[in-house]
Image (cartoon, rainbow, N blue to C red):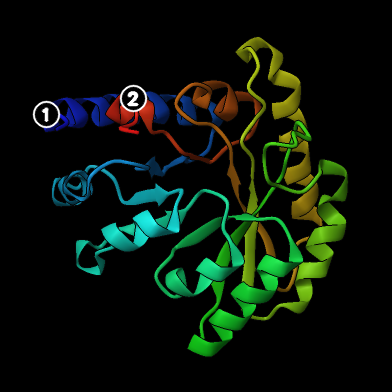
Amino acid sequence: MLDLSVVESNILKFKEEVNKLAGNAGRDVKIVAATKTQPKELIEFIAKKSLLTDVGENRVQEFVEKYDDALGLNYHIIGQLQTNKVKYIAGKIALVHSLDRYALADEIEKQSAKRNIVTDCLVEINMGSELSKGGVDPDALFAFVDGLRKYPHIAVKGIMSVMPNVEISALTAYYKKFASLFGELKKSAGGNISAEICSCGMSGDYAPAIEYGGSNMVRPGRILFGERNY
């Protein structure tokens, strides 16, 4: 079992570091704690201590097991989302981070229309064009976004990426490109497309993500909770 006092200390320290980086960058940065494999008791602790307002799950099954509306948290799906799992999260999620194909958009639209809601989403971009990762190719982003304008029950709030697994020093170009794409998205915003959220940066790369990538939403896990309990 995790030492909750250590978790609290880690979160407070991380918030302080992020607030400093955010101040230097001249923007607010939202922290979404990546709670994959972490116990529900940990999420309850975070909520009851008011340490964070947002938590993110990679797997829908884990989300279903841990979800508790009474905690007053904003829940996010930050991993790849299968179309047949959308029905389990519709109406319960603050933000889907991994919209990257029209088949998924079709199902989100269908399930949202059933509930008369609008589901907020980020378009995931595969900045390194890696076969092992989801996300649209950077060059295909704007064509994909244009195709999403026809979905009245989806609101595209911005973009997200999991950067390539390379040395931090080699990531600067990817971050700058990501920030540039976000700037271009702002220019084409309208209707159900907006550019409010620029999400990149996890435990190992949140600092350059904020400094170079324009990130205003980071998704730390390990730095808060230690290594995952696989």
Residue sitting at 65 percent across and 25 percent down? 212
Going by the numbered disc 1, the residue's amino acid type is Ser
- Circle number at residue 34: none
Give the residue pinned by disc 1: 5
Q: In this image, 226 relative to 87: left or right?
A: left
The CA span between labels 2 and 1 is 16 Å
Left or right: where does residue 205 sit relative to residue 132? left
Instruction: From the top left corner, tell me how far across and down residue 156 is, in percent.
Output: 65, 63
User: In the drawing, does residue 56 fall left or right of residue 129?
Assistant: left
Q: Quadrant of the N terminus?
A: top left
Question: Mark 1 and mark 2 in contact (Cβ < 8 Å)?
Answer: no
Residue in view at x 68 percent, y 45 percent: 134
Q: Mark 1 falls on what kind of element?
A: helix
| Quarter occupied by the C terminus | top left
Three-letter amino acid code at disc 2?
Glu
Give neighbour class at mark 2: few <14, some 14-19, many 20+ (Cα, 10 Å).
few
Q: Which residue is mark 2?
A: 227
**In terms of secondary structure, where does tag 2 sit?**
loop
Residue 229 appears left or right of 215: left
- Residue 123 falls in image quadrant: bottom right
Residue 195 percent location from the top left of the image: 67, 55
Q: Position of residue 82 (x, y in %)?
A: 58, 61
Q: Nearer the viewer, mark 2 or mark 1?
A: 2
Mark 1 or mark 2, which is nearer the start of the sequence?
1
Q: Residue at x 18, y 32 (%)?
A: 8
Mark 1 residue crowding within 10 angstroms, few (<14) / some (14–19) / many (20+): few
Image height of 23 relative to 152, above or below: above
